[in-house]
């Protein structure tokens, strides 16, 4: 998930994304073949501004798009270093459970290095030694700070900042 400022609609803030500052725009990314599912999840989790109707029921809300929290869905292939998303300035980049295929680690790290952001927040579960090696390899290019560790779920949240 990538967050960037979007000043044209500062009143759009939804409780589903409480960590976003007023005026934020959220871009959710995944592989091309997963975009349909990601888009469906965005629609299922969108909520109208100042409305409790979606909070109280699981029914989907039939409302105009202008009343939804601003979020867009974009394709991001880690090996495609010419991707338009990598050319933009981002306030924060959040990566959740993206460390699992060792063959993709080089592309993932290359993409992370190319991001124009001050902070990459990475949430992961260290399942195998290869996962720890990936986090350690990030230290060559990023200052790594452990923000949180959930011992019960064995989940780490790191803040990676370009050196």
Image (cartoon, rainbow, N blue to C red):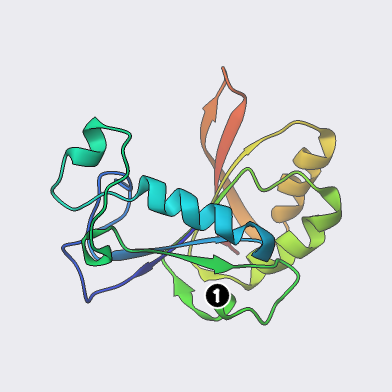
Q: Residues within 10 Å of mark 1 (few under 14, many from 20)?
A: some
The quadrant in which residue 23 appears is bottom left
- Residue lying at 25% horizontally and 44% vertically, measured from the top left: 15
- Above or below for 149 versus 159: above
**Left or right of 129: which side holds 25?**
left
- Above or below for 23 versus 82: above
**Left or right of 107: which side holds 146?**
left
- Residue lying at 70% horizontally and 54% vertically, measured from the top left: 138
Front residue of 95/27: it is: 27
The quadrant in which residue 72 appears is bottom left
> In this view, which residue lies farthest toward the right?
103
Pointer 1 residue: 85
Q: Position of residue 133 (x, y in %)?
A: 80, 44
Front residue of 26/42: it is: 42
Q: Position of residue 99 (x, y in %)?
A: 71, 46
The quadrant in which residue 111 appears is bottom right
Front residue of 44/62: it is: 62
- Above or below for 46 versus 11: above
> Can residue 94 be seen here?
no
> In this view, which residue lies farthest toward the left?
50
The secondary element bearing badge 1 is classed as helix
- Residue lying at 59% horizontally and 30% vertically, measured from the top left: 155
Q: Quadrant of the C terminus?
A: bottom right
Q: Position of residue 121 (x, y in %)?
A: 52, 50
Q: How many marks?
A: 1
Q: Position of residue 73 (x, y in %)?
A: 49, 64
- Residue lying at 69% horizontally and 67% vertically, measured from the top left: 77
């Amino acid at each position: 998930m990538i967050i960037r400022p979007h000043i044209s609609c500062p009143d759009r803030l939804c409780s589903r994304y409480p960590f976003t500052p007023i005026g934020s725009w959220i871009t959710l990314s995944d592989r091309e073949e997963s975009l349909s599912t990601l888009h469906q999840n965005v629609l299922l989790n969108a909520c109208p501004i100042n409305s409790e109707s979606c909070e109280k029921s699981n029914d989907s809300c039939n409302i105009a798009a202008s009343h939804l929290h601003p979020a867009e869905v974009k394709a991001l292939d880690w090996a495609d270093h010419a991707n338009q998303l990598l050319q933009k300035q981002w306030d924060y980049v959040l990566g959740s459970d993206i460390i699992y295929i060792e063959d993709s680690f080089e592309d993932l790290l290359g993409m992370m290095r190319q991001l124009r952001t001050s902070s990459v927040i990475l949430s992961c579960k260290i399942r195998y030694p290869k996962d720890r090696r990936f986090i350690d390899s990030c230290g060559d290019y990023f200052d790594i700070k452990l923000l949180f560790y959930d011992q019960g779920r064995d989940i780490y949240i790191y803040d990676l900042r370009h050196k």
